[in-house]
Image (cartoon, helix red, strand yellow):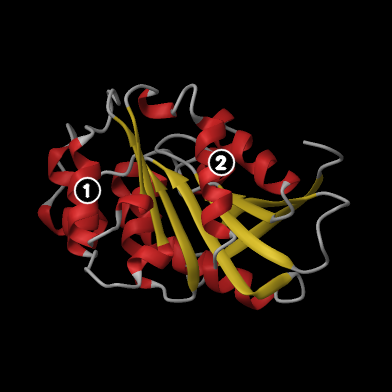
């Protein structure tokens, strides 16, 4: 990243004496007002993980502000919450609403026309397609290798938790989805089966151009990260 400017932030969780640890990234060429991309990590990753940093750098160099934060039980936030993420899964998903409102309230001087974009992989993608999907303030949702139904994980969550973290309980077919949502997956993903892509596509009624699929690349889109960035940038520029 060229001459990166880093602003470390604390996003307060009201009534919990908890702060989500995060960072806003920009560079000297970032416009005074620009869209904000909230870059959401996968399970057990954090804002310094390779995949997160790779796309943070790409989006900053493209002229965006990027905010990335550590979930409960992840990264620096783990110091406050402990590491049992499975006991905090519902809150990990719903915290994105607090983060979105924090950007709208505290970064309004930098935010261009309230343009907030959510970008994330794996669990980050599932957060986007659940809580992010509900928030009409979000202009674009880009979800990579997201799970459709958390009944299919090796971890056996209680039913009441599954219904709060599975995109299948949140997604609705609406024509506006094609203007707002981009999804992607690799057929050889060994962590989240490729069948999740078709389930999400069908549930949302997405057009073919809103769905990106690769034969290879695995869970980390190896060999296709530049393709994902280019497609995301093109999609974002439409909003």
Judge by depth and name the residue closer to the eye, 62 or 52. 62
What residue is shown at x 44% (from left), y 62% (from top)? 95
Judge by depth and name the residue closer to the eye, 12 or 66. 66
Which x, y percent locates residue 160?
Answer: 14, 59
On the question of residue 180 being in view, the answer is yes
What residue is shown at x 26% (from left), y 72% (from top)? 174
Q: Name the residue under label 1.
A: 148
- Which label lies toward us, 1 or 2? 2
Quadrant containing the N terminus in the rendered view: top right
Q: How many angstroms separate mark 1 from mark 2 (CA)?
A: 23 Å
Q: Residue 189: which quarter of the image?
A: top left
Which x, y percent locates residue 132?
Answer: 40, 64
Quadrant containing the C terminus in the rendered view: bottom right
Q: Name the residue under label 2.
A: 229
Judge by depth and name the residue closer to the eye, 211 or 123. 211
| 202 relative position to 94: left or right | left
| Secondary element at tag 2 | helix
Which mark sits nearer the N-terminus, 1 or 2? 1
Which x, y percent locates residue 37?
Answer: 60, 57
| Secondary element at tag 1 | loop
Which x, y percent locates residue 44?
Answer: 43, 34
């Amino acid at each position: 990243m060229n001459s990166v400017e880093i602003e470390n932030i604390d996003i307060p969780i009201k009534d919990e004496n908890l702060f989500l640890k995060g960072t806003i990234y920009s560079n000297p060429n970032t416009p005074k007002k620009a869209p904000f991309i909230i870059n959401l990590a996968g399970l057990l990753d954090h804002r310094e993980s390779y995949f997160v940093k790779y796309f943070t750098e790409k989006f900053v160099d493209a002229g965006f502000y990027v905010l990335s934060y550590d979930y409960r039980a992840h990264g620096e936030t783990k110091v406050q919450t402990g590491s049992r993420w499975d006991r905090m899964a519902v809150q990990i998903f719903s915290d994105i609403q607090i983060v979105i409102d924090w950007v709208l309230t505290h970064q309004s001087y930098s935010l261009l026309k309230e343009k907030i974009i959510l970008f994330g992989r794996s669990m980050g993608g599932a957060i986007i397609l659940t809580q992010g999907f509900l928030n009409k303030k979000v202009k674009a949702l880009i979800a990579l290798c997201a799970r459709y139904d958390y009944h299919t994980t090796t971890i056996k969550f209680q039913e009441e938790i599954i219904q709060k973290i599975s995109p299948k309980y949140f997604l609705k077919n609406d024509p506006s989805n094609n203007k707002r949502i981009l999804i992607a997956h690799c057929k050889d993903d060994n962590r989240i089966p490729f069948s999740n892509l078709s389930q999400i596509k069908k549930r949302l009624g997405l057009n073919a151009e809103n769905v990106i699929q690769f034969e290879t690349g695995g869970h980390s889109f190896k060999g296709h990260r530049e393709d994902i960035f280019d497609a995301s940038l093109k999609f974002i520029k439409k909003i």
